Amino acid sequence: MKMQIRSAFWLVLMVLPLGAFAQEEADSLSFWKKGGDASFTFSQVSLNNWAAGGQNSMTGTFMLNTFANYAKNKSAWDNSFTLGYGLTKQGSDNLIKSEDRLLLTSKYGYKAGGKWFYSGLFDFRTQMTTGYQDPPTNSNVISEFLAPAYMQFSLGMDYKPNDNFSLYISPLTSKSTIVMDDSLSKVGAYGVEAGEKYRGEYGASLKSVYKKENLLQNVDFFTRLDLFSNLADEPQHVDVEWEGRLNFKINNYLTAVASLHLVYDHDVKTSEEVIMDNGESTMVARGPKLQSKQLLGFGLNFKF
């Protein structure tokens, strides 16, 4: 079952661009605006007879951001795809992933008047490889491909005053949490019932995106905010995801990147290792916490 879903997912990723190209053949190229950027950041620390001590380390992160937007008459169709993967190695330890995400968003709107659009949105996100709670030992799996995966379908209104900003508000949102890994679903990870692989929630959502090239000279800025509230069950607990990124252009190919990614999901419980009185360690369940990820890197960047 898991292999079938995995195959279907990659098939969708291949078919969507083909559909876009087919539509492009039927319509003038002027109705499409496509582009993106790919970057690779790298850092290394190499020590030899260093009296103060320390470990050799290497980190590499690849990011791909693409978009294909269609606008004609009163119709607007925005599509974006993000892929990110990074690895870190310290000394003789096993490789540890530091970045891993797939994000696909598609939004169709029909102009209602002024800067407002009647809109429908589809959002899918997951990770590609296995994640561990105890790297570099790598004995406790906490994530896999499609474990978890999140899907959202929603209907609402989209405010688009220009190409740089969008504010999408939906009072009708369906959020699905998928956990296809048997060991994770067995313990009820990521909010699903123990033994189940799917959880459905219904509520309201908000999605805001702002991007600006040359916000300052040779500095590009991107930010997005996603909010979701399950109106049927504890609506006061709002799921929050925010990301901000600055790209500092050095020349046509070199760039420095600074980013911050914050996530709060009330259904994602955390745990931590506690040393007992007898000296043995055990994992103790904790409540939900704010998750954060920061990146400061230097490397290659290519825009297309």
Image (tube, grey):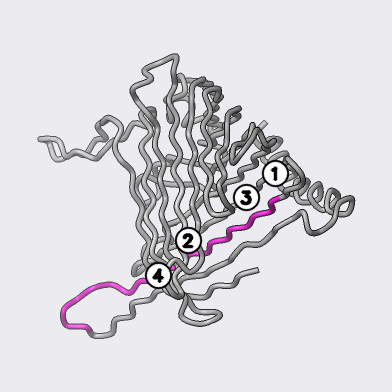
Q: Nearer the viewer, residue 285 or 100?
A: 100
User: On residue 77, which mark appears?
Assistant: 1
- Position of residue 54 relative to residue 127, above or below, is below
Is disc 3 placed on a helix, strand or loop?
strand
Disc 4 residue type (three-letter): Gly
| Residue occupying the point 78% across, 49% down | 20
- Position of residue 226 relative to residue 257, above or below, is above
Q: CA distance from mark 1 to mark 4?
A: 33 Å
User: On residue 80, which mark appears?
Assistant: 3
Q: Which mark lies nearer to you, 4 or 2?
A: 4
Q: Residue furthest bottom?
A: 49
Q: Which residue is mark 4?
A: 297
- Comes first in the chain, label 3 or label 2: 3
Disc 2 residue type (three-letter): Gly
Q: State the extent of the magenta-drawn residues as a range.
A: 50-69
Residue 26, given in percent of the width and then of the height, sits at 89, 50
- Comes first in the chain, label 4 or label 2: 2
Q: Is residue 65 magenta?
A: yes
| Residue occupying the point 51% across, 58% down | 85
Q: Which residue is mark 2?
A: 86
